[in-house]
Each structure stands twice: as structure tokens, then as C-alpha cells.
């Protein structure tokens, strides 16, 4: 692969996601940051299983045995499904918080502390 | 369908029963409320029975049980044509796993029975019970699986169900705020865990814990993975200084769910110990790892209890105590890990581990009971603010007695169960490092002090609220946990011999675990 | 295994049944001593009121100490410690994530230095 480009992208995407989670004060932006981290991790898993010039691992009598790894793809699919559920739940929490508090600013959504 | 068949397939059945029950609950709830209650209690009881069967089987055989999903025969971990690599999803149930499964299903049973009256006025009950069962599935899967990715999946099932349950009573948005924080922090933790799994898979082409442990070369990448795993699971277990979600989540959840969140945290604690001992224990510097766990434990114990002293919300106070008690478990098992492989291990390290593991079951029972009594108080009084309470002992007699038993037990007053495990921890940790042991005793005194505060301000004093005793099903839920507190308090040998000692020995023996899986599981 | 036997610990043992027996005997002793006490004491009369130099006792509702005031002295003595703890418990979700990432980075460093055997 060219300069390990996918792995560099993984680092950049996860870094952006963490930046958003640490420094953005809007709850929806925090959820976006979480989704970015998740995409980075998924990209990492898929890149792990990539073999240069490999074929899809779906044949029983394959033309060649040089295949990409199937397991990371299965992991990624599972992780994407979980991610969808998490994001949906978090965004619905945001809706309820906004209805009750009238704000999505993390500095104001802190009635529970100490 | 013989008895043997049931026993052999019990690791799969214990997941299937609550999972099917969870998806059946909304269906049955459409027809009849009463039938739904019977369905839930029946499935929780069945889960508890299967947990006891697993516990018994593992105790009798003395070896971990291996169950391979979709294999024939059920325990063929390494098929002949796989080249010595374990394939398929493998459940590896050793004595520690079966111990945790027993704890989780007992607390879930008590919580389920308790919820029937406690949540009777709420809407969308069928969803509540479906999520409660899914949460149980998550915990059971985490403790039984032998596969890291599977662990991640069950961790997420557990976190999602728990977060949704924390927000169940919206409570003017406060509960939703708590759930949001809990969901964010557990999702980022789970993603870090998944990243670590990816690194391990890239290195060793395996996801099975035993396989990874046997191939472990312990490069710098593995050290990164170790940090990702231990810190994440420590955070999920609620260790200070990553505990901020605990008082929010435990404090705002319904009573029965707070009790179950305690066991959910302990399932993460199980993961922390499993990863430290089995996956990294053979290659890593166990002294460093052990001291990390000890430091988390000491911080959690002390900061947890001092924060609890200044709380005036009954459940938030108890949540800080949950953090503080988790510290004891971390301390006990951490001492065991720090001394692993040295002569000191047999002298006091194993006893420290036994103390820490014994404290897990004791904590699940008494903290579960205390959260249930707190739920009962809130159910009748309608507020969780201790400043507005008083004199409840005049009318809520049984709840008061249950609260007293729980409070004395958490403070380590004999003859209740908290004393036996704390004694083990004090004595063995004293030989390791006297300062830690003395600190643990001070924390215990402060624990008693803050429960005296709760007892005084909620139950003593003049009659302020004209309330009745709580309904029967809530009392039954509390009585189940009280039974175990008194049983383990009066006969600590029963718990130690059948539950704790096998669990500690299994945890301290990673080679046996690895050999069992890679040896084909037969 | 004998369920009534001693629970052995690294440097001693613990026997809850024995403890319970001793406790019951002590309870009995305490009861016997209490029985020998003054018999003219009567509940609900002036005898049970606290003597406050001539003033009538306040009602129990008025003197019940509420939760927020208990251990005032303790928290006062540890004021610096508690104000620090209050300061770090901000309740802001970004800080929650920040603590987690911070500890992760710290442990990454420590493990890279001393993690190997």
C-alpha cells in the first residue's frame, strides 16, 4: 500500500474525533466526534485484513488462495451495526435533553455533579 | 433431551434463555400484563438455575468448560483440519466465570421481582423488562466468553441496554443527562477496546484469548494494547479517576437497575482481571500491572468514601460507596497479581485474591440490597434528597431492617458477609504493605460513618412522611439478597470453598486455561 | 468441609457462629444488669424530658438534625481537600472524556517504560 496511507488516515480520523469530543461544547458535535472515532476504528479493522491483489474470500474453489482476510470484515460489520444503535440512542438522548433543558451546551448540561 | 445434554449445552442455554425472553417480552406484554410478569420471572429463574448447573459442573470437574458454537461435538475447540487453531466462537467457562454468572443472575432475579411493584405505575414496561433481560445477557456473555471480540459485543449490548435503562425515568431530563454521559463514556471506551482487539488480531491472527496468550510475544504494540484494555475496563468498572459517570448513572437509574449496574460494573472488573491474568499475565511484568490495579484500588477506596460523606442524595451517596468498595476488590486482586509467580503468592497473594473475589459476591449482594432499599424509600417518599427525609422507621419496618443489614454488612461489621472478605483483604494486604491495609480499615470506618448518616437522616427522627410499607414483591426482592448476605456471613466457609477458592485458583492459573482451550477442549 | 468450622485467614481464623454465641451471652449479661436498675422510671412522664435549665424541651421535629448538617466538622477540617474534589467534579462530559484519555496516555507511557518483564 502507498505509504501505509490507510493507517495514516486512521490516525487522522481518530485524532479529529477525539479533538471534537474533548473541545467541542455542543452535545451533537460530541456525538459526531464519537462517530468519527468509530469510523477510524472501522477503517483500521478493514485495512488490517487487506492483502495487496487479494480476492474476495467468498469462493469455495478459488482461482487463487491469495485472499483478503474475512474476519476483520465480519468484525467491522458488527461494529458498524453497534455504532448505528449507539448513535441513534445518543441523538435521541440529545432530543430529550434539549426539550427539558432548552440547551445542548455541555457547560450547561451539568445539573448532576459533585 | 437428557440431563447430560442440558449440562453440556448450558453455556449456550444461559445466553439463549434471557435473549429469547427479552424479545418475547414486548410480544407477550401486548396481550396481558400478568402473563408478562410470569414470563419474566420464569425466564430469570430458569437463568438462575442454569447458572447454578454451570457452577456445579465446573466445581465438580475442576477444569474450565469449553463450549464451541456450532461445532459437533459441542466442545471441539480445535477441529482436526484447522491446523491447531481454535476457530468458531468459543465460550470458556472456568470457575471465575461461573462464579460471576451466578452473581449476575442472582441480582437480576432479585431486581426483576422487585421491579414488578416498583415500576407498576410506569409506562412502556414491556420495554423496560426487555432491556433488563438484554442487560443480563450482556453481563453473562461478558463473563462466559473466551473470545475478545465476543467480549466487545457483549460489552456493547450491556452498555446500550444499561444506558437506555438509566434514562427510563426521564425525571425532568436529569436521568437522560446521566444516561447520555454514561453512553458517551462507555462507547468511547468500547471503541478503544475494539482498537486494541484490532492490533492483537493484526499481530497474532487470533481473537481467542487462550490463543493470543499462547502466542504472546509482548512487543511494544502489546504494551499499547495492555494500556487500552486495562484502562478501559478499569473505567467501566468505575475506578477513580475515571469514575465520573458512576454517581450520575447509578444515582439516576431506577432502584433495581442501580443494583444491576453494580454487577454490570463487576462484569467489566471480571474483564480487567481476565485480561490481566490470562492474556497478559504470562508475558507482562505483573508487578507493574499489579501496582496499576492497586493504585486504582487505593484511589477508588479513599476518594470514593470521602466523596460519599458529603452527598445528600441517597442514591448518589450509595454510588460513591460502590466506587469505594470496588477499590477493595481491585486492591485484593491487584496484590495477588503483583505477587504472581513469587514465593509471596502462596504466602499471602492467593489469600488477597480470594478476599478480593469474595468481596465481589458480597458487594453485589449488599450493595444490591442497599440500592433496592433506596429505591423503596424513593418509591414511598418521592424524593431522593436526604435533607427532606426522616422518621421512615416508624412505618417502613421491613425496609429499615433490610437497610440496617445492608449498612452493617458494607461497613464490615460481624457477623455479616462484608466482614469475612474484608478480614481476608486486611490480613493479606498487611503482609504485602501495611500502609495499604491501614488505609483500607480507615475507609471502612468512614463507610460506617456515612451509613450512620443515611440511617439517621432517613429512618430515625420524628415521623415526617405518612407512608406505608412497600408492596410485597419489593420486599421479596430485598429478602433474596438478604438471604445470601446472612448465609455468607454466618457460613463464610460455604462461599469460600464452593465459590471463591476455585475462582481464585482458576484465575491464577492461566496455563491451565490456555491448555484447556488449545488442547481441544475435550 | 465443615460449614461451622473456622474460616482460616493468612494469620488467624474467624468463626462467626462462635462470635454470635459470645454476642448473645453478652446481650444476656447486659439484660441482667439492666434488670437490676432503677424501677421507678416511667415513660412518658416528666422524668424522661431532658433538663435544660428550666426551659421546656423543644419539639422533636425542630431538633432533628438533617443530612446536610451531619459531619459538618469533618468536611470543614478537610476544606482544602474537598474544594479540590468539588472543583474536579465539573459534570461536563468533555472533562469525563478528558480524564479517560489522560489516564490512557499516562498508562501507555508507564507500560512502555516498565511493562515488559
Image (cartoon, grey):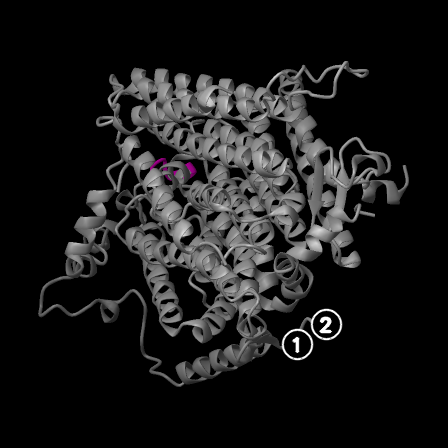
Specify the segment rendered in magenta: B379-383
* Residues tagged 2 and 1 counted as in contact (Cβ below 8 A): yes
- Percent from the top left, x then y, of residue B481? 57, 51
Q: Quadrant of residue C53?
A: bottom left
Badge number at residue C1 = 2
- Percent from the top left, x then y, of residue B163? 46, 30
Label 1 neighbour load within 10 Å: few <14, some 14-19, many 20+: some
Decide: is B256 above or below A17: below
Find out whether residue B381 is within the magenta segment: yes
User: Which chain's residue wears label 1?
Assistant: C
Q: CA distance from mark 2 to mark 1?
A: 8 Å
Residue B414 shown left or right of residue B320 in the figure: right
Secondary element at image label 1 = loop
User: Which chain's residue wears label 2?
Assistant: C
Viewer-proximal residue among B139 and B198? B198
Decide: is B65 above or below B494: above
Viewer-proximal residue among A23 and C12? A23
Residue at x 69%, y 35% (from the top left corner): B15
Label 2 neighbour load within 10 Å: few <14, some 14-19, many 20+: few
Q: Main secondary structure of the magenta part?
A: helix
Find out whether residue B59 is within the magenta segment: no
Residue designated by label 1? C5
Amino acid at each position: 500500500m502507498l505509504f501505509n496511507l490507510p493507517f495514516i488516515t486512521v490516525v487522522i480520523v481518530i485524532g479529529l474525533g477525539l479533538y471534537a469530543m474533548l473541545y467541542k461544547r455542543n452535545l451533537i458535535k460530541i456525538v459526531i466526534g464519537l462517530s468519527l472515532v468509530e469510523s477510524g476504528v472501522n477503517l483500521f479493522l478493514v485495512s488490517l485484513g487487506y492483502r495487496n491483489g487479494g480476492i474476495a474470500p467468498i469462493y469455495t474453489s478459488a482461482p487463487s488462495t491469495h485472499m483478503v482476510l474475512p474476519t476483520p470484515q465480519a468484525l467491522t460489520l458488527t461494529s458498524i451495526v453497534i455504532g448505528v444503535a449507539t448513535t441513534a440512542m445518543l441523538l435521541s438522548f440529545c432530543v430529550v435533553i434539549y426539550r427539558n433543558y432548552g440547551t445542548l451546551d455541555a457547560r450547561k448540561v451539568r445539573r448532576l455533579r459533585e | 433431551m437428557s440431563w447430560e445434554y442440558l449440562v453440556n449445552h448450558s453455556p449456550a442455554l444461559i445466553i439463549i434463555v434471557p435473549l429469547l425472553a427479552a424479545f418475547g417480552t414486548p410480544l407477550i406484554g401486548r396481550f396481558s400484563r400478568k402473563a408478562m410478569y410470569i414470563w419474566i420471572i420464569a425466564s430469570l429463574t430458569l437463568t438462575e438455575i442454569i447458572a447454578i448447573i454451570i457452577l456445579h459442573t465446573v466445581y465438580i470437574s475442576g477444569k474450565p468448560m469449553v463450549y464451541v458454537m456450532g461445532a459437533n461435538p459441542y466442545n471441539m475447540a480445535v477441529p482436526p483440519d484447522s491446523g491447531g487453531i481454535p476457530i468458531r466462537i468459543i465460550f470458556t467457562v472456568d470457575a471465575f466465570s461461573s462464579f460471576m454468572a451466578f452473581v449476575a443472575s442472582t441480582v437480576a432475579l432479585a431486581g426483576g421481582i422487585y421491579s414488578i411493584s416498583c415500576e407498576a405505575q410506569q409506562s412502556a414496561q414491556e420495554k423496560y423488562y426487555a432491556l433488563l433481560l438484554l442487560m443480563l445477557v450482556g453481563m453473562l456473555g461478558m463473563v462466559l466468553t473466551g473470545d475478545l471480540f465476543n467480549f466487545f459485543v457483549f460489552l456493547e449490548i450491556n452498555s446500550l441496554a444499561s444506558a437506555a435503562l438509566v434514562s427510563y425515568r426521564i425525571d425532568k431530563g436529569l436521568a437522560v443527562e446521566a444516561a447520555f454521559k454514561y453512553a458517551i463514556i462507555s462507547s468511547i471506551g468500547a471503541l478503544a477496546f475494539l482498537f486494541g482487539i484490532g492490533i492483537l488480531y493484526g499481530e497474532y491472527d487470533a481473537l481467542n484469548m487462550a490463543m493470543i496468550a499462547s502466542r504472546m510475544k509482548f512487543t511494544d504494540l502489546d504494551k499499547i494494547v495492555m494500556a487500552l484494555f486495562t484502562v478501559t475496563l478499569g473505567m467501566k468498572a468505575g475506578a477513580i479517576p475515571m469514575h465520573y459517570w458512576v454517581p450520575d448513572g447509578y444515582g439516576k437509574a431506577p432502584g433495581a437497575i442501580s443494583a444491576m449496574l453494580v454487577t454490570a460494573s463487576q462484569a467489566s472488573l471480571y474483564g480487567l482481571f481476565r485480561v490481566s491474568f490470562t492474556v497478559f499475565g504470562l508475558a507482562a511484568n505483573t508487578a507493574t500491572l499489579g501496582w496499576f490495579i492497586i493504585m486504582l484500588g487505593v484511589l477508588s477506596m479513599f476518594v470514593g468514601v470521602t466523596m460519599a460523606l458529603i452527598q445528600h442524595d441517597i442514591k448518589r451517596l450509595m454510588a460513591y460507596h460502590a466506587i469505594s468498595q470496588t477499590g477493595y476488590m481491585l486492591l485484593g486482586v491487584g496484590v495477588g497479581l503483583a505477587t504472581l509467580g513469587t514465593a509471596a503468592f502462596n504466602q499471602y497473594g492467593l489469600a488477597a485474591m480470594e478476599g478480593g473475589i469474595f468481596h465481589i459476591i458480597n458487594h453485589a449482594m449488599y450493595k444490591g440490597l442497599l440500592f433496592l432499599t433506596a429505591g423503596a424509600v424513593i418509591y414511598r417518599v418521592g424524593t431522593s434528597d436526604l435533607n427532606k427525609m426522616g422518621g421512615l422507621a416508624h412505618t417502613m419496618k421491613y425496609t429499615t431492617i433490610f437497610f440496617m443489614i445492608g449498612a452493617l454488612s458494607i461497613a464490615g461489621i460481624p457477623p455479616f458477609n462484608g466482614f469475612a472478605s474484608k478480614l481476608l483483604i486486611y490480613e493479606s494486604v498487611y503482609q504485602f504493605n501495611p500502609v495499604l491495609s491501614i488505609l483500607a480499615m480507615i475507609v471502612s470506618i468512614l463507610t460506617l460513618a456515612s451509613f450512620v448518616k443515611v440511617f439517621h437522616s432517613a429512618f430515625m427522627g420524628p415521623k415526617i412522611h405518612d407512608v406505608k410499607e412497600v408492596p410485597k414483591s419489593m420486599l421479596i426482592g430485598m429478602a433474596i439478597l438478604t438471604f445470601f448476605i446472612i448465609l455468607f456471613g454466618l457460613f463464610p466457609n460455604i462461599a469460600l470453598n464452593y465459590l471463591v477458592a476455585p475462582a481464585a485458583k482458576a484465575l491464577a492459573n492461566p496455563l491451565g486455561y490456555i491448555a484447556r482451550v488449545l488442547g481441544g477442549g475435550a | 468441609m465443615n460449614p461451622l468450622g473456622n474460616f482460616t485467614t493468612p494469620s488467624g481464623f474467624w468463626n462467626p457462629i462462635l462470635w454470635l454465641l459470645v454476642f448473645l451471652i453478652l446481650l444476656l449479661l447486659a439484660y441482667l444488669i439492666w434488670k437490676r436498675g432503677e424501677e421507678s422510671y416511667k415513660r412518658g412522664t416528666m422524668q424522661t424530658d431532658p433538663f435544660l435549665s428550666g426551659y421546656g424541651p423543644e419539639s422533636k421535629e425542630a431538633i432533628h438534625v438533617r443530612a446536610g448538617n451531619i459531619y459538618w466538622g469533618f468536611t470543614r477540617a478537610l476544606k482544602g481537600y474537598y474544594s479540590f474534589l468539588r472543583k474536579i467534579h465539573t459534570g461536563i462530559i468533555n472533562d469525563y472524556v478528558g480524564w479517560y484519555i489522560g489516564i490512557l496516555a499516562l498508562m501507555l507511557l508507564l507500560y512502555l517504560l516498565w511493562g515488559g518483564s
